[in-house]
């Protein structure tokens, strides 16, 4: 399949401008190996490994199987008590890129720059994008309203052009893309250099989550995605299962009161994050009534449980089909102008 060249493919040395987005509990070594084989770049949340030994072993397993870029997602705020250790391991193991989320990337950038490790930063607005650019980030990931997990407040059609006008570093789109036509639009219409896609890869044989979770991504669609603050304290997208409907999606008055207390805020956020992640973990690997499945609206494009390589192949074929059609339209318009003149 013909390559798609952008600034992202140049930075990471990949065939197609796609990052297999980091997904809590879902991303693993098997998915990453298949993603690299397919010509895209995988990124795994550091929190998916319980211990430093497991993280090192996981990275070694990927490197032993394939040659290609490996990314790690770091939660860089105080809710992640393992952050310092995870960053040190990333630098020592020489991962290819890091995606930072939910905090300042300054320390990450300073640690990674001397080793040639790229740092991409999740952003949801211009102010923060300009901040991370000033700190030395290599690119920003524009997390839009349709992203899975922690979504932003703006649509991609608003956010990406705004970022391009205000920062000089590349912009990668995250959220709402589930097919090759969407990739084409983000790159050629909105101006991104690539896309970060996660939710459409949940329903794959390589994903370690339960069959019920995978099937839910097939059975539910964009209309079934809701935002909840009960998992991490920040808005997070989940499938609107009967259990989610029962417990609600907003913090109760007591949780809000504790979260607003300046002295307790840090500890409450850590506790909320821990409890929320435990609930998500329980649902991801077991078939229970208490199902809290994280996903984004792009599960609308998931019609069956399929291998990572097949999903990537379809995305690329769809992209090229749209690109060919657009080139034909441009050629026809040019010919029309010539004939009129």
Image (cartoon, helix red, strand yellow):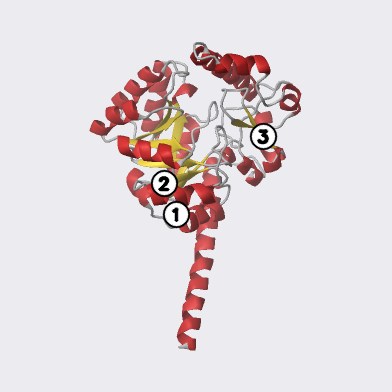
Q: Is residue 76 toward the left or the right of residue 303 in the image? A: left
Is tag 1's residue or tag 3's residue first in the polypeptide sequence? 1
Where is residue 319? Give x, y as percent: 51, 57
Quadrant occupied by the C terminus: bottom left
In the image, residue 282 sits, relative to residue 337, either above or below, namely above
Q: Report crowding for label 3: few under 14, some 14 to 19, many 20 or more residues within 10 A (C-alpha).
A: many
Q: Are marks 1 and 3 in contact (CB under 8 Å)?
A: no
- Residue at 71% over, 20% down: 290
Give the mark nearest the N terminus, 1 or 2: 2
- Judged from the image, the secondary structure of the residue bearing numbered disc 2 is strand
> Residue 337, position in %: x, y?
48, 82
Local SS, label 3: strand
Question: In terms of sequence position, does the residue under pointer 2 or pointer 3 come before the other?
Answer: 2
Residue count near mark 2 (Cα–Cα under 10 Å), binned few <14, some 14–19, many ≥20: many
Q: Residue furthest left?
A: 114
Is 213 situated left or right of 9 in this image? right
C-alpha gap between disc 1 and disc 3: 28 Å
- Disc 2 to disc 3, how far (Cα)? 26 Å
63 left or right, relative to 33? left
Q: In the displayed structure, would residue 275 be above or below residue 3?
A: above
Cβ atoms under marks 1 and 2 closer than 8 Å: yes
- Mark 1: few/some/many CA within 10 Å (<14, 14-19, 20+): some
Q: Nearer the viewer, residue 308 or 80?
A: 80
Residue linked to disc 2: 171
In terms of depth relative to the viewer, which is nearer, 252 or 248?
252
User: Mark 2 near mark 3, Cβ–Cβ under 8 Å?
Assistant: no
Residue at 53% x, 17% y is: 269
**Residue 191, numbered label:** 1
Q: Which residue is mark 3?
A: 226
């Amino acid at each position: 399949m013909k390559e798609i060249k952008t600034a992202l493919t140049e930075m990471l040395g990949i065939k197609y401008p796609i990052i297999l987005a980091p997904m809590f509990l879902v991303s693993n070594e098997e998915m990453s190996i298949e993603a690299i084989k397919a010509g895209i770049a995988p990124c795994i949340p550091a929190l998916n490994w319980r211990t430093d030994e497991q993280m090192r072993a996981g990275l070694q397993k990927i490197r032993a199987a394939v040659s290609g870029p490996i990314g790690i997602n770091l939660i860089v705020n105080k809710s992640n008590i393992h952050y310092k250790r995870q960053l040190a391991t990333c630098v020592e193991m020489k991962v290819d890129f890091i995606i930072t989320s939910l905090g300042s990337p300054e320390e990450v950038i300073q640690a990674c720059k001397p080793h040639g490790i790229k740092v991409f930063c999740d952003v949801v607005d211009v102010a923060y994008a300009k901040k991370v650019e000033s700190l030395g980030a290599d690119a920003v990931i524009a997390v839009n309203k349709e992203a899975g997990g922690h979504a932003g407040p703006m649509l991609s059609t608003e956010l990406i052009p705004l970022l391009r006008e205000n920062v000089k570093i590349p912009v990668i789109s995250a959220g709402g893309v589930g097919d090759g036509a969407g990739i084409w639009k983000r790159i050629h219409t909105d101006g991104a250099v690539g896309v970060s896609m996660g939710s459409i890869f949940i329903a794959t044989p390589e994903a370690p989550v339960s069959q019920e979770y995978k099937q839910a991504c097939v059975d539910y669609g964009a209309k079934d995605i809701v935002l909840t603050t009960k998992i991490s304290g920040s808005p997070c997208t989940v499938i609107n299962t009967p259990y989610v409907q029962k417990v609600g999606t907003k913090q109760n008055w007591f949780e809000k009161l504790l979260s607003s207390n300046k002295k307790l805020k840090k500890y409450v956020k850590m506790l909320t994050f821990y409890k929320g992640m435990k609930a998500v973990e329980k649902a991801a690997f077991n078939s229970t009534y208490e199902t809290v499945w994280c996903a984004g609206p792009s599960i609308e494009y998931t019609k069956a449980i399929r291998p990572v390589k097949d999903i990537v192949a379809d995305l690329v074929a769809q992209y090229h089909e749209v690109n060919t059609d657009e080139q034909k339209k441009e050629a026809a318009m040019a010919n029309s102008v010539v004939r009129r003149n």
